Amino acid sequence: MTAATLRVLVVGSADGLGRAYADEFLRGGARLLYAGAPDPKGIAQIEGSGGSAVSTVHIPTWEEAAGFVDATLDALGGLDVVVNAAGTTRDRTLVRMGEDDWNTAINSSLRTAAAVIHRAAEHWRATADPDRRRTIINRTSTSWLYSQPGQANYVAAMAGAAALSEVAAKELGRYGVTVYGVCGPMDEEDLRALTEAGRSPGTGLQRRIQGPEGPARAAASLAAVDAPSGTIFLAREESIGVIGQLRVERTEPVGEGPSGMAEGIRRLAAQVH
């Protein structure tokens, strides 16, 4: 299957990372539907490049997000690739974070991705086709890798997206679906969110700031290149890497009772630090 024959759904905002994903697929000749927040200029540019676009509310409900799949099927006659690129930061420390801050970060990315995957999986299960490749690519972030302070909500959403990718890979493989997570470096949107929150990213974080081109190129390539399903990639402009799965590094035997467990924890902590 060539890029020109792909039918792609990209879910995200009409600028930033999601827009970069859409542009990369369109450059390869894919037929594409873009579901993003209302942005007349961005949507006009996508349509001017040959794609279709639908506007959505900032944070779609489960039913609205699932409807993006139906809109793609109606517009393109099928679906081969899903790119979940939506994400919103609401930077607060935990002591200052409110319920709306938490829900906005979680629902804009993780809930939206889950709803889109659910509906796409229903369609692919009902239309099994061994001759067509089906691919899901989920956005995640280095904020998760670095446990970025002040972004507990966004970090939880991005960690959830990585875990969702791994579980979906195991569940959907029977339908010929491969699933990947693509983790990009901190981008200008992340930097702007930190600045608006009155926080300085510091020299170390500034060195990790890049544009969205690396993740976008990786996403387009993963729609055509065979790689183990469930892999989480770290995509930079100059390199591509694989993020290892969480695993148990070491264990210690414990004696009976609380004192036995406490002693085991002390021995283990001494090895970790």
Image (tube, rainbow, N blue to C red):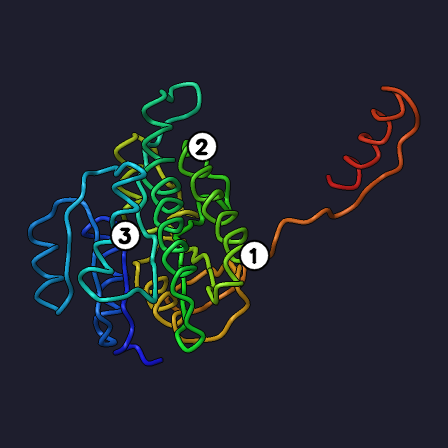
For residue 138, what is the image quadrant?
bottom left
Q: Nearer the viewer, residue 115 or 90?
A: 115
Q: Is residue 27 left or right of residue 211?
A: left
Between disc 2 and disc 3, whose residue precedes?
3
**Quarter of the image that includes the C terminus:** top right
The answer to whether marks 1 and 3 mark residues whose Cβ atoms lie closer than 8 Å is: no
Q: Secondary structure at mark 2?
A: helix
Calculate the distance from the C-alpha at mark 2 to the C-alpha at mark 3. 23 Å
Q: Which mark is residue 11?
A: 3
For residue 266, what is the image quadrant?
top right
**Quarter of the image that includes the N terminus:** bottom left
Between disc 1 and disc 3, whose residue precedes?
3
Q: Which mark is residue 152?
A: 2
> In the image, residue 187 lies at what x, y percent?
32, 51
Q: Secondary structure at mark 3?
A: strand
Query: Would you name the residue on which mark 1 appears?
Result: 170
Kind of residue indicated by mark 2:
Ala
